[in-house]
Image (cartoon, rainbow, N blue to C red):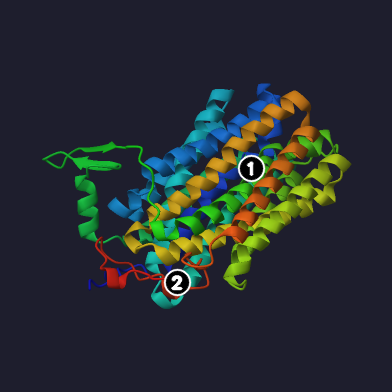
Amino acid sequence: MPSAPPRRPGGPLAPAAVALAFWVTMAGTTVPTPLYPLYQRAFGFSTFTVTVIFAVYALGVVAGLLTLGRLSDRIGRRPVILAALLLAAAAATLFELADSLPWLLAARVLSGFGAALVTGAATAALLDLAPPERRLRAQTVALAANMGGLAGGTLFAGVLAEWAGSPLRLPWTVTLVLTGAALLGLLAVPETVPAEVRRAGRSGSPTGSTLRFSPTGSTLRFRPRLRPLHVPPGIRPAFLRAALAGGAGFAVTGVLTAVSGLFLATVLGLHNHALTGLVVALAFLSTAVGQLLVRVLPPARALPLACAGLVLAAALVAGALLGGTLPPLLLGACVNGLATGTAIGTGLGTVNGGVEPHRRGEAVSAFFAVLFTMLSVPVIGVGVLVRATGLRTAGVGFSAAVAVLALAVAAGLVRRPRHGASPVPTAAEPAAVPAAAPAATPAAARPGKA
């Protein structure tokens, strides 16, 4: 049985540096959220265009996950995280220089690719760097970096836009400074993917994205290929149920991200960028709390409770739209986040408990590909409905659709076979996640049923 790769120097700074890189990259993706009304006024585009700008980011994430999701398993975590930070810096630069809509679209695409790269690579790196007895803590750090970045970006951008000068420039300057700090921190991060796996990955394979070097070693060519990411058959039913429930919640979060500023301004008469950032930040922070709840909830109850929470959240958001009041919107954002986080935590627990370490990045990327697909498409649909029927009608119709999807997932849980179905491991079961191993893991070393 092959042993785990030796731990390399890095000490406590290595996980902190990976977490910072993760946080900064994800924060950059939500900085535009409270700024959308300002961009609308500056560049003169419609609410529908705002939803398209947001969806372009999510579609960029999906494209990146499908083409690059397995890259960190092949060439190493560190170079992929480095590429994500460089993309984040390029996106922030484009935003800071933007003077028209095409600049914003290009920046969002780069943000999407950066998020796609860092999601799988940083999560896997944090798990790789952790000894077996601290695997659960590593999962918590990854969660805090991911959701904390999403919440932090929209929050600090809203505060700067509301109370500091240059609202369309200063948030991006701060983002660039933070990205520079994360790039420096990456120097303290050792590579955790074994050298033999990286050599095999660089030599290319018949399928999937490849890296090829010239015979002299002086040039590097990257050739991405679109190929579905692999999910082991044994966990697919549980994976799909968690992904659909989490995706429904992500869809609500996406709509909140895209049109909260419009709702606050046009329905409530509140022109406050910091408040817009707060609404979205509450949704993401609650998502983090929801993922932590998975550790104390019985596995059989986690997903049904998530579905119930999604239905309640949809009702609260619809009530806020119909009544024109703020408290139901804030409560709905929190409840939706809790439910979404519970579904996501269940899905990630399934991945961690049923996937070999050398394919962990690919499986995590597959899970988030489903989530971000469900994040992007409904947002565009809401944009079309807003144009045709108005914000209230579009929002209520969307909320009803989310509730129906959550009920459908719940009905599937009731009807699933009681015999032969794979149980759903949770994030509270770190023992089910084996230590990092080389590319070939014998069957005896692979995780079994929890």
On the image, numbered disc 2 is attached to which residue?
135
Outermost residue toward the bottom in this view: 133
Q: Specify the amino acid type for callout 2.
A: Arg
Residue found 74% across the figure and 43% down from its top: 400
On the image, numbered disc 1 is attached to which residue?
254
Q: Is residue 93 visible?
A: no
Q: Give left or right: position of 176 versus 166.
A: left
Looking at the picture, does residue 360 appear above or below residue 36? below
Q: Quadrant of the C terminus?
A: bottom left
Residue nearest the viewer, comparing 311 with 422: 422
Question: Residue 339 appears in which quarter of the rendering?
Answer: bottom right
Mark 1 or 2 closer to N-term?
A: 2
Dot 1 lies on which element?
helix
Q: Specify the amino acid type for callout 1.
A: Gly
Q: Give left or right: position of 85 versus 255.
A: left
Q: Quadrant of the N terminus?
A: bottom left
Q: Is residue 239 visible?
A: yes
Residue found 76% across the figure and 54% down from its top: 312
